[in-house]
Amino acid sequence: MSITSIGDSRPKITTATLAERKSKRQPITCLTAYDYATARLVDEAGIDIILVGDSLAQVVLGYDSTLPVTVDEMLHHTRAVRRAVKRALLVADMPYGSYHTSPEDAVRNAARFLKEAGAEAVKLEGGEKRIDHVRRLIDAEIPVMGHIGLTPQSVHAMGGYKVQGKTLSAVEQLMRDAVALDQAGVFSLVLEGIPREVAAMITEEVSAPTIGIGAGPDCDGQVLVIHDLIGLTFNPPAKFVRRYAEAGTLISEAIEMFRRDVVEGNYPSDSESYHLPKDTGAALDAIQERKRAMS
Ligand code: KIV
């Protein structure tokens, strides 16, 4: 089988596909996934990029930031997603601390995502200050997705989750970050939490496709955290989130129906039970009949 075909009519998405999409101005879709079932649904729906985001820390593991999640936890979830994904490009997020120490650590940890979990690329946060890391990863044949703007791993450095790029100097820095990453060879660039005008300028300037989240409609593609999109979160959504379903409500209702049925003796019914084969049942009846006769 060709590595660009997945055995059905859908062509495999590669970094080259994404570059072509940008040149043809065809929008790119990206969603997060962290487990087999969700990843299957996302892949089968035709989403182009599946990101095992470190948002895993918050939406799946219940932490209040992305900082605590470890490489081993990210690997565990990336493997589950890998087993589901056939068509999409599978990108794994490098968690906090896995690349901040040195480019050597970045390569060592990123290589684990490719070797041990089947990821096809990694994502890391930061602009100019990560250029050495990005170059070293690309030298090691590891495709890199950049991520600038509101970078959640910098929550303490930023003083909270705040929209970035609002002053002239901040816009200039964002542009320098974007151009540096583009020149270093990232295959795509996530723009998070920045004014749409700035995202539009960056998208125009760089050759790598930009993937926006809270960055307006002029990016080359859009990404959302799947739990936000399906309504499976417990905090009010950010301004940019569009909820396409209320999965939390749906799941709560199903759980409540199950609870009520069990308490009221309505679950399971006879038709939801297994039965003995006829001859075993008859033999058992006969034994019980003999026991009753003897007592
Ligand atoms: O971790 C994540 O889910 C992300 C996306 C929001 C881009 O980084």
Image (cartoon, rainbow, N blue to C red):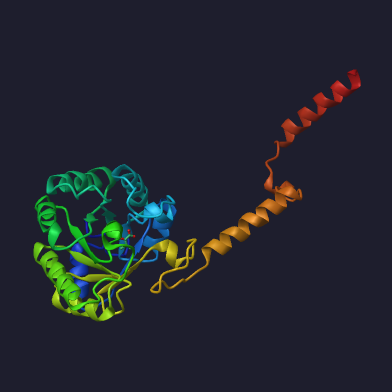
Residue at the top extreme, as displayed = 294
What residue lies at 43% left-to-right and 67% top-to-bottom?
Answer: 229
Whether residue 270 is visible, yes or no, is: yes
What residue lies at 47% left-to-right and 71% top-to-bottom?
Answer: 244
Horizontal and vertical percent for residue 30? 32, 66
- 65 lies above or below 290: below
- Ligand 1: quadrant of the figure: bottom left
Indicate the quadrant where residue 152 lies: bottom left
- 92 lies above or below 222: above
Whether residue 7 is visible, yes or no, is: no
Horizontal and vertical percent for residue 54? 33, 54
- 39 lies above or below 71: below
Residue at the bottom extreme, as displayed = 197
For the residue pair 15 and 246, the one nearer the viewer reads as 246
Q: Is residue 211 left or right of residue 229?
A: left
For the residue pair 3 and 204, the one nearer the viewer reads as 204
Q: Is residue 290 left or right of residue 36?
A: right
Indicate the quadrant where residue 41 lies: bottom left
Quadrant, the C terminus: top right
Horizontal and vertical percent for residue 218? 26, 80
